[in-house]
Amino acid sequence: MAKSTILAILMMVLVLGMVTKQTQGQEMCRDLLMRAKNCDAGTCATLCKQKWKGNGSCFPNFQIKSCLCTFPCKT
């Protein structure tokens, strides 16, 4: 029982270390889409994926909701 628990913990640490290594050093860029219109979550996500291959989400911006697109910067 103790050996399997220790092995499971070591495997989790190894996997998390590999994931961290892959994303480390990757600078993220942002772009505001749909500035004049009120944001729709589905449209925001689709536009962001088409334009930047990134993730889009709506956020409150004064009187309207804006679409914020986050994507990996090209080097």
Image (spheres, rainbow, N blue to C red):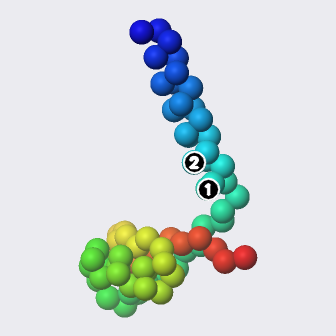
Left or right of 21: which side holds 48?
Answer: left
Which quadrant: the N terminus? top left
For mark 2, what is the residue? 19
Badge 1 density bin: few <14, some 14–19, many ≥20, Cα 10 Å: few
**Whole-percent x, y for residue 5 in the image:** 46, 17
Left or right of 9: which side holds 26?
Answer: right
Looking at the image, the residue that sits furthest to the bottom is 36
**Whole-percent x, y for residue 8 in the image:** 48, 24
**Whole-percent x, y for residue 14 in the image:** 59, 35
The amino acid sitting under disc 1 is Thr
Residue 28 appears in the rendering: yes
Residue 65: quarter of image:
bottom left
Residue 61 appears in the rendering: no
For mark 1, what is the residue? 23
> Are discs 1 and 2 less than 8 Å apart at CB?
yes
Looking at the image, the residue that sits furthest to the top is 2
Of 9 and 46, nearer the camera is 9
Q: What element carries label 2?
A: helix
Which quadrant: the C terminus? bottom right
Badge 2 density bin: few <14, some 14–19, many ≥20, Cα 10 Å: few
Q: Who's the residue at 48% across and 74% down the image?
A: 54
Of 14 and 71, nearer the camera is 14
Q: Who's the residue at 67% across and 54% down the image?
A: 24
